[in-house]
Each structure stands twice: as C-alpha cells, then as structure tokens.
Image (spheres, rainbow, N blue to C red):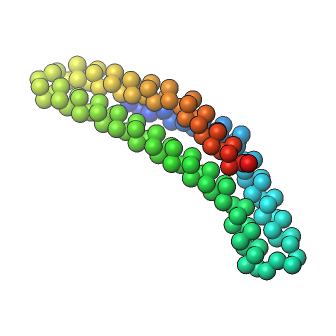
Amino acid sequence: MMAEFQQARVQSAVDEMVQCLERDHIRKMQSRMFRCSAECCDRPGASMQQVHQCIERCHTPLAQAQNVVTTELERFQDRLTRCTMHCTDKAKDAFDSGSKEPAVKAQMEQCITSCVDEHVNLLPSMTRKLRETLDSFGK
C-alpha cells in the first residue's frame, strides 16, 4: 500500500513536469515545425527530394528535443529504480540476519519513502535543465 502511494507520488510529479514542458516548449516547437514544413511544400521550384530534405530539417529540432526529454526521464527512472533496489537489498539483509517482518517492512517503507523524497526533490533542477536545453533547440 505504501509503495503504491509512493509510486503514485512520483508519477504525479513527473507527469506535472512533462505537461509543463509539453505546454511551454514542445507545443511551440511543433508549431514551428509544421509552419516550416508547410513553407517547404510551398516552394514551387523545389524537387520532391529537396522538399523532403527541407521537411526533415524542420523536424530535426523537435525530434532532438523529444529525445533529450525521453533520455532524461529514463535516467531519472533508472536512478529511482537503483535506489529502491538498494532498499530491497537492505530489507533482505535485515530479514536474513533475524529481524522480524514488521520491523523489516517498516524499514523498507521508510527507505522507499526516502528514495521518493530524494528523487521528487531532484525534479525542479531537472526541469530547469530541460527547459534550458529545449530553449536552445528553439534558437
């Protein structure tokens, strides 16, 4: 029950971050990409290949931005997973050394809560870094 609550807490914080990035940065990039692509199609003297290459250039910044966000989210998830795996290892060690189940369970819940607190607290700096990166793609 506690683990589900903590998972929901992280998910909610990450969802909020992603929605802000999407609303404030990604949508603007999508808008520029579509306008740029339409301009490529409006070139009467361009060959089919030139139009295709032009459209690819228009799509590149958005694709790079989405890749950066995805990579950063995967890195965040990996770190959180490693932290919770450490909690599991500590709980197993405590159980193996003779600690009673209620004490081990409480220790594990406290450890997981600590992992979640630590990682949720990382989100503002991660968001700031991603905003700066996304802004650089818009230039």
Examine the image and state in which quarter residue 136 appears: top right
Q: Residue 64: horizontal and vertical position, in percent?
A: 61, 54
Total marks shown come to: 0
Looking at this view, is 119 or 2 the one in front?
A: 119
Answer left or right for 32 relative to 2.
right
Residue that appears at 23% across and 23% down: 104
Residue that appears at 23% across and 33% down: 89
Q: Is residue 86 visible?
A: yes
The answer to whether 114 is drawn above or below residue 128 in the figure is above
Examine the image and state in which quarter residue 82 appears: top left
The answer to whether 36 is drawn above or below residue 132 in the figure is below
Q: Is residue 19 visible?
A: no
Q: Residue 77: horizontal and vertical position, in percent?
A: 44, 41
Q: Residue 50: horizontal and vertical position, in percent?
A: 75, 75
Q: Residue 3: horizontal and vertical position, in percent?
A: 38, 30
Residue that appears at 63% across and 57% down: 63
